[in-house]
Structures are given as structure tokens and as C-alpha cells.
Image: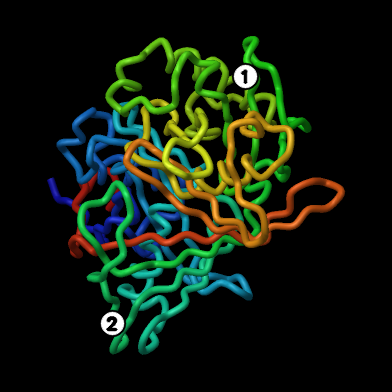
Amino acid sequence: MRQTDIPCILMRGGTSRAPYFNAADLPRQRETLSEVLVAAMGAGSPLQVDGIGGAQPTTSKVAMLSPSSDGWAEVDFFFAQVHTERGEVDFSPSCGNILSGVGPAALEMGLVEARDGETPVRIRNTNTGAFIEAIVQTPDRQVRYDGDARIDGVPGTAAPVILNFMNVVGSKTGALFPTGSPVDVIDETDITCMDVAVPMVFGRAADFGLSGTETREEIEADRPLFDRLESIRLIAGELMGLGDVTHSVVPRCALLAPPRHGGAITGRYFTPWTAHPSYAVTGAICTGACLLSAGTVAADLARVPDGNPVPVRIEHVSGVIDVLFDVDRDSTGLVVKSAGLLRTARKLMSGVVSIPGDIWK
């Protein structure tokens, strides 16, 4: 059997990992594209032993890049979440951690010309319509990966990648509060449904019998918790106008508690069927917006400093993640002008990934 070789760059982006493809090297037809990505990642098997996936949601992701037709952006970023066991592909969400590698990958692929010193890469996320500027370190017009920046959830240090997110409110639903209210009661539990960078469902950890400081292992062992969260998430998805989300990774979920170590909030993030090993970038942006909005489930838990821009530190299972918000308020509520984060990325390898030729010649 002949195999089909597809060029890609395997890269760590933030606390996740993915192959980064030039979209021109992939099929355009969505059904065939899904089959190709499932084969490349070895999805449909929990260990993904027959592909390059890492047997975890954070390492079973795909980034596809192309020149942008937008007047502002230079690169279009199309994201896919490949379900490890079901062998399904979800194109509905985005991923801010994988976005950390888009700027470096675009430069490596020649989609953007590097400048000497640092290079701003203007990105349009086609999953959500959000616009992001990534600042990549490029001394001597080469992508730099080594440096002193550190992010919790990743060993060692690396060169910083600065991400500035714009147009993040209503990423999928067109509304800050897709249900029309900062609090809804689902299954006799107060819930906040928000859509900033990614649709999310928030609850108070205490309402789920948690302190909010549980380890990932403790959370993963609590299967009744996942059953209850999923029941609420499915109802919330309908209320948010997302339809049946049984097979979709959005909305995501987070359980919040008061901070313990000087941050603004303690959070435990769900992907949604497993506990995240740290905290998603888009999830951090939505969580910060929840803290800054009046009347949400976070209102009596958060400790947010005054002023603008507003630094928001989220304490999570592996450490902290910081988001800097430029916000305003009008008659409709919170207006998020931009949200900025520091991430890191590293090229792990480049070459081709091989898939069975009968899937796509």
C-alpha cells in the first residue's frame, strides 16, 4: 500500500502540541480533511499509537495555516480538535495555546517575511473570526526559540511570544451573555454562560462539592462530577444557541473558587471531558471577562484590581496564567477591547506525516 506524505511542522504551542500544516497541502473538502487528520493523529484509539497524536486532548490538536484574504491579517489560522478515542474532528473551537505557535510556524513556512529583532504576525482565526497579533522574536530574521520566558505547565524556559487578542466577544454566539443573563439556574445550580474568545460554562466549585484546589488526578477520579458537568453543559449549549453539543468540545467548562496565592481567582478548567493539565488561553480570556462582568457566579469570589488595563491572574492546577485586559463599559455591559498574554512555543520537528494512500492520494 502506498502512503501519502504531507509536509508539516510538529510544534509545542503554549501548553499544547500539534502538527502545523500549510492548508495548501491538505484536501479542501471537509469530510476528506477530517479523514486525513484522523489518520495523521491516529485517532480512534486511546493511545493514538498509529499516528502522531499524544493520547491527550492537549496533544491531539491540529493547526492549518494559509495566506489571509483579510485586509488586516496576514495569516489565516484554522484549528481542529481531534478526539482521541472517537476518531472525530471538531472544527468549532479555537485554541489559544496552539495559536502561540502560529506566528513561528508562519515564519518557518515562509507565509510571512521575518524582520530583524522581532516580527509582528497578524492572524485571523477562521474558526471564530477573532483577530490576533503575535509578536515573535526573530534576531537576524530567524525565529528564536530559546529564551528566559517561563509559563506554568511547560518545563524550562523559551523565547516569549506575545499574543494580543481583539474582537473576542461573541466568538460563536455573537453575545457576551448568550442566554441573555449573567446567571442561569440549571439543575438547581447557578451557572454563568459567556462567550469571550470561546463559549464557556462557569460554576462555583463549592456548588459542586469542591474547594477549587483539587489536583488534576483528584478531579479525574471524580467521575460523578464529570457526569453532572456534562448534563449541565448539554443544557447550557442549547440555551446558548449552540444546539446539540454532545459531540462538540464547546462550550468548555470551568469551576471557580476564591484565590489562595494572591491571584484574582482559582480555576479548574475542563476540555470538557477531561481536566485540563493547566489552563487554556482562550479559556483564561473568557474567565477574566467573567470576573470583570457584574452579576456572574464569579462576582463574590474574585479579587480584581482597579484601573485599566486590568491584570488578571488565574491560579490553576499547574501554577498561574496572566491576562492583561483593556476594557470599557457601555449600556450593554463589559466591552473587551483587547486581551494580551505571554506564551512560548518551540519547533519540535519538521518533515512529513504519512497516512494510508487509500484515505487520500
**In this rendering, would 179 be left or right of 223?**
right
- As drawn, the residue found furthest toward the right would be 331
Q: Position of residue 226 (x, y in %)?
A: 43, 17
The residue lying toward the viewer, choosing from 208 and 241, is 208
Residue 168 drawn above or below residue 209: below
Residue located 26% across and 51% down the image = 154
User: Number of marks in the image?
Assistant: 2
Badge 1: residue crowd in 10 Å (few <14, some 14–19, many ≥20): some
Look at the image and tell me whether residue 7 can be seen: no
The correct choice, above or below, for 72 with respect to 205 in the image is below
Q: Quadrant of the N terminus?
A: top left
Q: Position of residue 247 (x, y in %)?
A: 48, 27
Decide if residue 307 is on the left or right side of residue 109. right
Question: Residue 298 occupies which quadrant of the picture?
Answer: top right
**Residue located 58% across and 46% down the image:** 288
Residue 157 badge: none
Residue 94 on image: x %, y %: 49, 48
Residue 34 in the image: above or below residue 256 = below
Read off the residue under disc 1: 235
The residue nearer to you, when weighing 160 against 102, is 160
Amino acid type, callout 2: Gln
What amino acid does circle 1 point to? Answer: Ile
Q: Are marks 1 and 2 in contact (CB under 8 Å)?
A: no
Residue identifier under label 2: 142
Q: Nearer the viewer, residue 305 or 76?
A: 305
Asked if residue 52 can be seen in this view, the reply is yes
